[in-house]
Image (cartoon, helix red, strand yellow):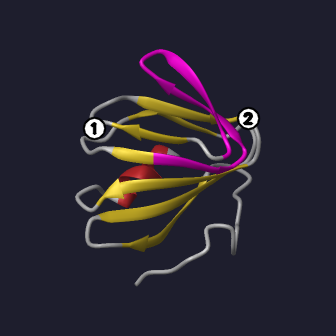
Amino acid sequence: MKYTNILKDLSYNDVKPSISVLFQTDSTKEIRILFKAGQIMAKHQTKFPITVTMVKGELDFGVDDTIHNLVEGDIVALAGSVPHDLTAKTDCIVRLTLSMADDVNRVKKVVE
């Protein structure tokens, strides 16, 4: 069994989104991304599918030149190789589920 609380030990970064690994399973990596209002993750993609869960806040999720407004409780599944970007409208807590074959450092490089 793996256990964590996505709402505990929050540490926002004033300059860029804060990325931390919550835990790994045999098939996924569970990532928390903390955004301050106005922070972005520029257009990027991965060859693996991802799932994005809005835990708290509101952000714009761009896919195929369409902006999708995500709010608390929204869940998005995105196929691999689909370019996407994120812009926080408010302070946000986002859960990102990656394939075990994906690399957390790839996600961290997007915000640098």
Whether label 1 touches label 2, CB < 8 Å: no
Tell me the element at label 1: loop
Tell me the element at label 2: loop
Q: Main secondary structure of the magenta part?
A: strand
Image position, residue 48 (x, y; %)? 26, 45
Kindly report the distance in space between the C-alpha atoms of the residues bearing marks 1 and 2: 25 Å
Residue at the image point whose x is 40% and y is 35% from the top: 44
Asked whether residue 63 appears in the rendered view, the answer is: yes
Q: Crowdedness of circle 2 by 10 Å Cα count: few (<14), some, many (20+)?
A: some
- What amino acid type is highlighted by mark number 2? Lys
Image position, residue 51 (x, y; %)? 42, 47
- State the residue position of label 2: 89
Q: Which residues are magenta?
A: 52-72
Asked whether residue 112 appears in the rendered view, the answer is: no
User: Which quarter of the rendering shows the N terminus?
Assistant: bottom left
Quarter location, residue 47: top left
Picture layout, residue 94 above or below residue 25: above
Q: Crowdedness of circle 1 by 10 Å Cα count: few (<14), some, many (20+)?
A: few
Closer to the camera, 108 or 51?
51
Residue at the image point whose x is 71% and y is 60% from the top: 12
Quarter location, residue 7: bottom right
- Does 62 lie within the magenta span? yes
Image position, residue 28 (x, y; %)? 33, 63
Q: Left or right: where does residue 48 sit relative to residue 104?
A: left
- What amino acid type is highlighted by mark number 1? Gly
- Does 60 lie within the magenta span? yes
Residue at the image point whose x is 23% and y is 58% from the top: 101
- State the residue position of label 1: 80
Closer to the camera, 58 or 108?
58
